[in-house]
């Protein structure tokens, strides 16, 4: 009989758990950026959400490259092409995030929950496709 540890690892691969932890820090960065631009700079929510998404994507790339994909770490000048690849891969996740957050915000008028909803909406897409394309690893959910 397989141990609970093996069952959990089959359902949630270590890389996915690390990616999720990085995503959690990215969510914090995202919400902080969103709050600054929406509340203090007084940008419309859609623009603040867009900026926050880009800032979070950038930080997530560098943190994932250092920790989650340590064995496949991108170095040197390829770090820039990897970042561009990550942006391209995650652009659909970002679009999903921005649109779903904006729709939620206009229904509920709660920028914090809308930001969280947006972050969650694109995260699975981002993990799967960045694993396959940016770091070229055949990981799966």
Image: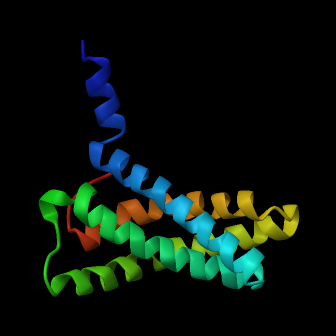
Q: Residue at x 16, y 87 (%)?
A: 77
Seen in the image, is 98 located left or right of residue 68?
right
Q: Is residue 130 above or below residue 17?
A: below
* The one of 109 and 120 positioned closer to us in this rendering: 109
Name the spot of residue 78 as percent of width and height, x first: 17, 84
Seen in the image, is 101 located left or right of residue 95?
right
Q: Is residue 18 above or below residue 11?
A: below
Name the spot of residue 38 as percent of width and height, x first: 74, 77
* The one of 86 and 36 positioned closer to us in this rendering: 36
Q: Residue at x 57, y 67 (%)?
A: 30
Residue placed furthest toward the front:
40
What coloring was used for the rendering? rainbow
Count how many numbered circles sit on residues in the image: 0
Q: Is there any visible trace of residue 92 in the rendered image? A: no
Q: Is residue 3 above or below residue 20?
A: above
Q: Residue at x 78, y 83 (%)?
A: 42
Please state, as top left, top right, bottom left or bottom right, where the N terminus lies in the image.
Answer: top left
Q: Residue at x 55, y 59 (%)?
A: 28
Name the spot of residue 126 as percent of width and height, x first: 43, 65
* The one of 15 and 63 positioned closer to us in this rendering: 63
Q: Quadrant of residue 76?
A: bottom left
* The one of 42 and 13 positioned closer to us in this rendering: 42
Seen in the image, is 31 located left or right of residue 61?
right
Q: Quadrant of residue 62?
A: bottom left
């Amino acid at each position: 009989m397989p141990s609970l540890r093996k069952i959990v690892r089959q359902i949630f691969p270590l890389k996915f758990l690390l990616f999720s932890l990085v995503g959690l820090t990215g969510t914090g960065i995202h919400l902080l950026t969103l709050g600054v631009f929406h509340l203090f700079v007084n940008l419309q929510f859609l623009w603040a959400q867009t900026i926050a998404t880009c800032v979070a994507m950038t930080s997530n790339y560098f943190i994932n490259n250092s920790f989650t994909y340590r064995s496949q770490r991108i170095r040197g000048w390829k770090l820039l092409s990897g970042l561009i690849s990550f942006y391209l891969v995650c652009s659909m996740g970002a679009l999903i995030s921005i649109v779903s957050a904006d729709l939620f915000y206009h229904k509920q008028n709660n920028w914090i929950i809308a930001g969280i909803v947006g972050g969650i909406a694109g995260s699975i897409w981002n993990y799967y496709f960045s694993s396959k394309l940016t770091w070229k690893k055949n990981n799966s959910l």
